[in-house]
Image: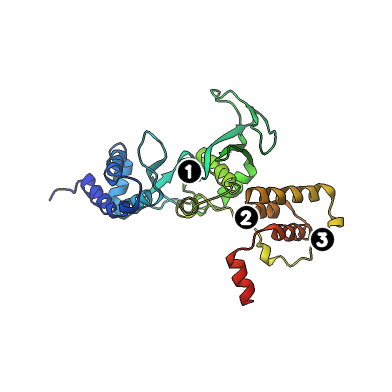
Amino acid sequence: MSNPNPLVICKEQISQSAVKFATSELSYEAEEVYAIQHLMKNDYLLNTAMNEPASLRLAMYNVAALGLTLNPTRGLAYLIPRSNKKGEPPKIVLDVSYRGMIALANSEGIVANAVCELVYEQDVYTFKGPTRIPDHDANVFSTSRGQVIGGYCITELVNGKIQVHNMSKADMDQIRDSSQAYSHGGGPWVDWESQMQLKSILKRAGKWWPTSTPKMAKLVEYLNVENGEGLATLQQSPKNIETMPALESDIDSKTLSFINNAVSRAVSTQSFEACKELLVNRIKDPAFLSFALQRLDEVRPVTETDYQEAVSA
C-alpha cells in the first residue's frame, strides 16, 4: 500500500476552509494557491501539516476571518510550524507580522500608516515628544549595534496627526514573560524575538489610537492568546482598589502634572483604557493612584453598560 501524498492531505484540509471565505474579502482560490506555495517551499511545514492536518484547516479559518492574505510578496501573514511547549509536537498556526497588523489597521480605517523601529545601545535616539517625529541616528548595516534597549512606533492618524510611542526593553521583557509559550521554552518569543518586540511596541501604540474595530480586537486577542505571544495585563484592577484617594494638595507637583497630562490626553484621543493602564503601571503610591483613577473616571464618557450597572445596583 502506497504512502499518502502529503499535498493531497493538505489540499483536502485547505478545501474544507472554503466556506469560511464566503464572507471574507479574500479570494479562497488565491489563498489556496498561496497556502500550497508555503507548503511546497518548506518540507518541515509540509510534514507538520500532514501530521496535524486539523491545525492547517484552523489556520486557514483564521486567514479568512482576519482577512490577511498569505501572498508571500506582501509579507503580511504566514503559515508556520510552531510548538508552544518545548518537546511538544508542532502544529500549523497563522503568524501575522507587525506589517500585517499595520495593514489591517489601515484597511479598517484606524490609522493612515505606522512604522516601528528597535533602538540599540550604539544608536543615538532623541525623543521630541508624543506628537513630533524623533531623531534616530544608526548605522543600519552594522552588525555591532549592541543590545536592544527599546523601540518606538510612529503612527500617522487618519486626520494627519502624528503619535509617537516608546517602549523600553524592560516592558518588552515583561510582555514576553507573560507568554505561557515562552515559559515552556517554546513559541514566537523563542524563535523570532525581534519581530515579537516590534509587535509588542505596535500593540502598545494601538491602545492609544482613537478607534478600534472588532476585527482588530480579534487579531490582537488571537496573537496574544492562541499564538502564545503574551498578554500584558494590569497587575491590579481599579475596581479592587479600596485605598482612600489622596487629596490633590498632598500629591507632589511632578506626579500631579503626570496625572493631569495623562487624563487630558485620554480625553483628546478617547483612549481611556490605555490611560488606565499607564496610570496603574506608573504610579506606585496607592493613594495617589486611587486619586488618578478617580479623576479618569470623572472624564470618562458614561456607557450603556455603566448605566445598566448603576440601575441594577
- The answer to whether 147 appears left or right of 225 in the picture is right
Q: Label 2: which residue?
A: 273
Q: Which residue is at a point 58% across and 46% down the rendered structure image?
A: 209
State the CA–CA distance, disc 3 to disc 2: 22 Å
Q: Do the CB atoms of the residues marked 2 and 1 lie less than 8 Å apart?
A: no
Q: Label 3: which residue?
A: 246
Residue 139 on image: x %, y %: 58, 23
Q: Nearer the viewer, residue 134 or 200?
A: 134
Q: Which residue is at a point 71% across and 49% down the rendered structure image?
A: 264
Mark 2 is on which residue type?
Glu
For marks 2 and 1 on the same chain, the one whose residue lies earlier in the sequence: 1
Q: Name the residue furthest left.
A: 1
Residue 46 on image: x %, y %: 29, 44
Q: Nearer the viewer, residue 118 or 191?
A: 118
Q: Considering only vertical position in the picture, is 78 above or below 88? A: above
State the CA–CA distance, disc 2 to disc 1: 20 Å
Residue 180 on image: x %, y %: 51, 54
Q: Secondary structure at mark 1?
A: helix
